[in-house]
């Protein structure tokens, strides 16, 4: 019998708003996922950021790509030009400061920027936020990031990303708190928002889980770059694909995803990355959890984005409507032997 993942009980919730900065990255097969599919070469994917509000306290989970990406450290500019294509949109601080919806959450109201990890498509430009905004990072990220460029010519992170602000490093080493199979950190201390230890893709990589309703409970899982396509986590042994969604007979075993975590440049620790994917699959099988990966292109135009909340996703049936849409990416593909 399969044991389902468990999430600690709480009646506390947060408001979650997803920010689509309208930035597109080209993600290539072989670099960001492995597959036996012929004809699925890659796609142009968005980068989602999250505004998490706990009453009058506000934090951001990721900042996306800075709009002037050629002002990243030279090492990163070279990496971008060698591995992908970038079409930039908006920076998160401007999204908040130019919002005319009446929400009235500005960049100066953000107490913390949480980097899921220190890769360019998530770090954005922290200098667009006031020095009072804390930068929150995962284990080992401080030592891996600073001194930055130009103090260290071959650094991947800028000195200005941390200049004049507190950098707080989360540790999970002695964590007794678990969310599913993840070691967890209770950010607000009341079970409303957890940071999750999700290694594999990068040093200190974190995912997050936000409690969006209390009765019945529902959650939004922020997957960051634990994987780059839903076809890596679905279908699984815990979540089989509906027969009507099977694309041209591609799935002969409905418990096997068509994509997998690649070896090589993008995932620093392959074994840990695969384990992290398995942990996500446990939560993805729970009907009360909506998994949102940072680069899931199928969600654009199908779920509410900032300034709207995503909290009522369960009542609106958004999970059921969107969870197999990624199959459309494989319409022109076929299995190679």
Image (cartoon, rainbow, N blue to C red):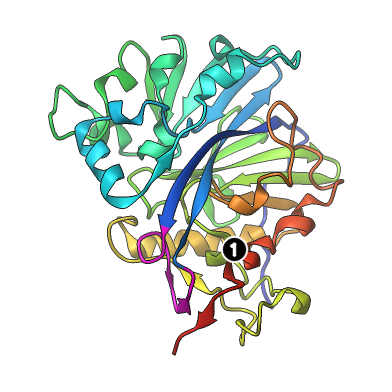
Q: Which residue is drawn at 33% across and 55% down?
A: 266
Q: Can residue 170 be seen in this view?
A: no
Q: Which of 175 and 197 is in front in this view?
A: 197
Question: Quadrant of the image for the C terminus?
Answer: bottom left
Could one spot residue 144 in this view of the protein?
A: yes
The x and y percentages for residue 166 are 37, 16
Task: Kindly identify the residue that appears in the image at 62 percent across and 14 percent down.
Answer: 98
Q: Where is residue 25 in the image (x, y as percent from the top left)?
A: 45, 46
Tell me the residue at 73%/43% (across/down): 303
Q: Residue furthest bottom?
A: 337
Give the left or right position of residue 223, taking residue 30 as reference. right
Q: Mark 1 points at which residue?
A: 281
Structural crowding at the residue carrying mark 1, measured as other residues with C-alpha within 10 Å and reported as few (<14), some (14–19) or many (≥20):
many
Task: Let me know if residue 38 is in the magenta part.
Answer: yes
- Say what secondary structure mark 1 lies in: helix
In the image, 267 versus 174, the foreground residue is 267
Q: Between residues 256 and 7, which one lies in front from this camera angle?
A: 256
- Residue appearing at x 30%, y 43% in the figure: 80
Q: Position of residue 241 (x, y in %)?
A: 70, 74
The quarter in which the N terminus is drawn is: bottom right
Label tally? 1
Quadrant of residue 73 within the rendered picture: top left
Highlighted magenta segment, given as a residue range: 28-40
Q: Nearer the viewer, residue 81 or 293?
A: 81
| 327 displayed left or right of 147 | right
Percent coordinates x, y for residue 301 in the rendering: 71, 44
**In the rendered image, the vertical position of residue 58 relative to residue 251, given as above or below:** above
């Amino acid at each position: 019998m399969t044991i389902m993942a468990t999430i600690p009980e709480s009646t506390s919730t947060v408001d979650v708003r997803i920010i689509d900065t309208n930035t597109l990255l080209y993600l290539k097969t072989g670099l960001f996922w492995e597959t036996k599919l012929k004809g699925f070469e890659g796609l142009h994917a968005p980068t989602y950021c999250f505004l998490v509000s706990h009453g009058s306290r506000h934090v951001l989970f990721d900042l996306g790509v800075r709009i002037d990406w050629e002002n990243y450290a030279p090492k990163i500019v070279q990496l971008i030009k060698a591995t992908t294509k970038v079409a930039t949109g908006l920076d998160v601080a401007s999204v908040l400061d130019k919002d005319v919806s009446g929400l009235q959450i500005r960049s100066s109201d953000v107490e913390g920027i949480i980097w899921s990890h220190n890769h360019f498509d998530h770090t954005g430009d922290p200098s667009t936020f006031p020095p009072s905004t804390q930068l929150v990072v995962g284990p080992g990220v401080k030592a891996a990031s600073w001194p930055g460029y130009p103090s260290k010519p071959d650094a991947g992170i800028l000195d200005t990303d941390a200049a004049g602000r507190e950098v707080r490093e989360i540790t999970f080493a002695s964590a007794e708190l678990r969310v599913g199979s993840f070691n967890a950190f209770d950010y607000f201390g009341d079970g409303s928002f957890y940071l999750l230890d999700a290694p594999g893709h990068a040093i200190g990589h974190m995912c997050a889980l936000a409690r969006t309703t209390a009765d019945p409970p529902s959650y939004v899982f922020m997957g960051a770059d634990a994987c780059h396509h839903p076809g890596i986590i679905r279908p699984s042994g815990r979540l089989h694909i509906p027969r009507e969604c099977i694309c041209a007979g591609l799935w002969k075993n409905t418990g096997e995803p068509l994509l997998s975590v690649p070896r090589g440049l993008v995932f620093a620790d392959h074994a840990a990355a695969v384990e992290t994917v398995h942990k996500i699959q446990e939560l993805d099988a729970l009907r009360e959890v909506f998994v949102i990966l940072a680069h899931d292109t199928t969600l654009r135009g199908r779920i509410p984005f900032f300034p709207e909340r995503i909290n009522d996703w369960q009542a609106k049936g958004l999970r059921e409507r969107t969870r197999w849409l990624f199959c459309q990416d494989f319409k022109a593909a076929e299995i190679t032997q």
